[in-house]
Image (tube, rainbow, N blue to C red):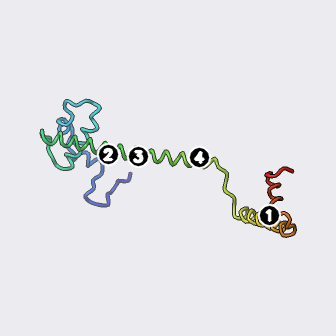
Amino acid sequence: MATIQPLRGDILPADQAANDRQPAGAALAPWLAGRPAEERLVDLLAFALATERGLLATDETVPLLRDQAYSALAAYSIRHLHNRVAEIRQEAVLEHLGHFRRPPGLLKLVLANVLGLILAGGVAGALYLHPEYLHQETWAAFVGLLPG
């Protein structure tokens, strides 16, 4: 069976790293003592912050790091909620846009413009050939302002 060889010498395989670590139970006990179960995540993060900074569990550091952990979790949860709301909105917009027909292509737009030009030219030609349509009485009768 093949063995895993790390590329860097300072990286230990998982089984050797587990043997070199000290159990965290004794160091974690002051952080969890007398705390409700729903605060466990804050306490674990506070312990991780203390371990990262190399601080010991004292009466001053425990509440301070718990507050920092709580504010970091609150900021993360707000960021996560905001990003999730944005994702849900984007999915809703994409779903709503999926109900629309495809927009017309270039050929349809060109043909519609040509048809519009032909109709406008026909109206202009009719007015040129029959200038009596341009009289005010004729237009008023056409739009229904004069009886008869």
Res 102 quadrant in image: bottom right
Q: For the residues marked 1 and 3, what is the alpha-carbon distance in whole angstroms?
A: 53 Å
Frontmost of labels 2 and 1 is 1
Q: Is residue 53 above or below residue 24?
A: below
**Image point 31% across, 42% down: which residue?**
74
Circle 1 crowding by C-alpha within 10 Å: few under 14, some 14–19, many from 20:
few
Circle 2 crowding by C-alpha within 10 Å: few under 14, some 14–19, many from 20:
few
Circle 3 crowding by C-alpha within 10 Å: few under 14, some 14–19, many from 20:
few
The image shows residue 30 at horizontal and vertical percentages of: 17, 36
* First in sequence: mark 1 vs mark 3: 3
Q: Indicate the amino acid at tag 4.
A: His
**Image point 17% across, 40% down: which residue?**
62
Q: Secondary structure at mark 2?
A: helix
Q: Secondary structure at mark 1?
A: helix
Q: For the residues marked 2 and 1, what is the alpha-carbon distance in whole angstroms?
A: 63 Å
Q: For the residues marked 3 and 4, what is the alpha-carbon distance in whole angstroms?
A: 21 Å
Foreground: 60 or 107?
A: 107
Residue marked by disc 3: 82
Residue marked by disc 2: 75
Q: Which mark is residue 96?
A: 4
* First in sequence: mark 2 vs mark 4: 2
Residue marked by disc 1: 119
Give yes or no for contact between labels 2 and 4 (Cβ–Cβ under 8 Å). Answer: no
**Image point 25% across, 43% down: which residue?**
69
